[in-house]
Amino acid sequence: MKTGANFSSEKILIAPSILSADFGKINEEIASIEDYSDLIHVDVMDGHFVPNITFGPGQIGKMRSGKPFDVHLMIENPDEYLGEFAKGVKSAVGEDLYHESYLVVHQEAVPALRETIQAIKMLGMKAGVALNPTTGWETIETVLDDLDLIVCMTVNPGFGGQKFIESVMPKVVKLKELRPKLLIEIDGGVNDQTAKLCKDAGADILVAGNYVFNALDRRVAIESLR
Ligand code: DX5
Ligand code: ZN
C-alpha cells in the first residue's frame, strides 16, 4: 500500500553520486551519466564531520557538467566555506545551471540553520538541509518554509555502498505530509528494490552511487530507479 503516494510528484528525479566514480577521470565519469541524470550529487567530506575525505571547492571547480550539481556538504562549520563551494559550482556548471544547483548542509553541523539557508540563497543557489538517519523532522520544523530541499539520509554518512535504513521512511512520509510541495531527496543505499520504498514514502529525488557507477550499464541502472 502506498503511504505518502498522494503527495509524491509524478516524475522522480535521479541524482547519481560521483562518490562511487573513478576520481582519476571524474569528468569522463560525469559525462557517462549526465544525459540520463537530473542532477549530479557531489559528496563533500572533510574527515571531521564524517570519517572520510573527498572533494574540496578547487576540485569541484575543475569538474564539468551539463546538469546542475547537488552538493552535499558533510563538513563541520559549513558557513565558513559556502562562498568557496558556490564558486566551484559556478565554474563546473556555468552561470545558468548554477542557479539550479543545490548547496546542502547538515542540520547536525550548523548552529543557526535559518542564517545558513539565507546565506546559500544570497549566493544565488538553492538551499537544502540533510538529516542523519536518527535526526528527527522536528529539528527543521521552523525552517521548512525557507528550504528548497530536504535530504533524508538512509545511511550514516561517510561511505558509499552501505545498507539502506528502512526505518527512516516514516520521517519522509511525515515531512511530505507537512509540506507536500517541498522536494525530498533520499540518499544512501538506493537500488532498484529500495527505490520503490522511497517512492511510496513520497520521495522526489533519489541519490544512487554504488548502484549506478558499478552497474554494467549505467543508463539501464538509472532508468530502473524511475
Ligand atoms: C554517503 C553519501 C551518499 C553516498 C550514496 O555518505 O552521502 O551520497 O554516496 O552512495 P550509495 O548509493 O552507494 O549508498
Ligand atoms: Zn550524499
Image: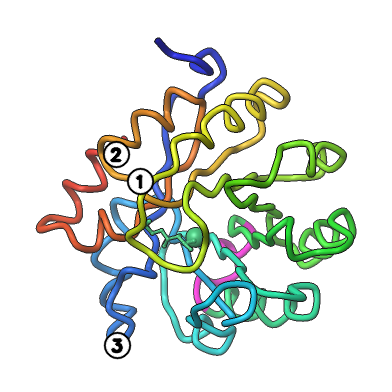
Viewport quadrant of the C terminus: top left
Residue visible at 43% across and 23% down in the picture: 200
Q: Residues within 10 Å of mark 2 (few under 14, many from 20)?
A: many
Residue 68 seen by the camera: no
Q: Is label 3's Cβ within 8 Å of ligand 1?
A: no
Q: Is residue 4 magenta?
A: no
Mark 2 vs ligand 1: CB below 8 Å: no
Residue assigned mark 2 = 225
Q: Amino acid at mark 3?
A: Gly
The amino acid on which the numbered mark 2 sits, given as a three-letter code, is Leu
Q: Position of residue 126 (x, y in %)?
A: 68, 55
Range shown magenta: 92-99
Residue neighbourhood size for the residue with mark 3, other residues' Cα within 10 Å, grouped as few (<14), some (14–19), many (≥20): few
Q: Which residue is mark 3?
A: 24
N-terminal label among 1 and 3: 3
| Mark 1 vs 2, N-terminal side | 1
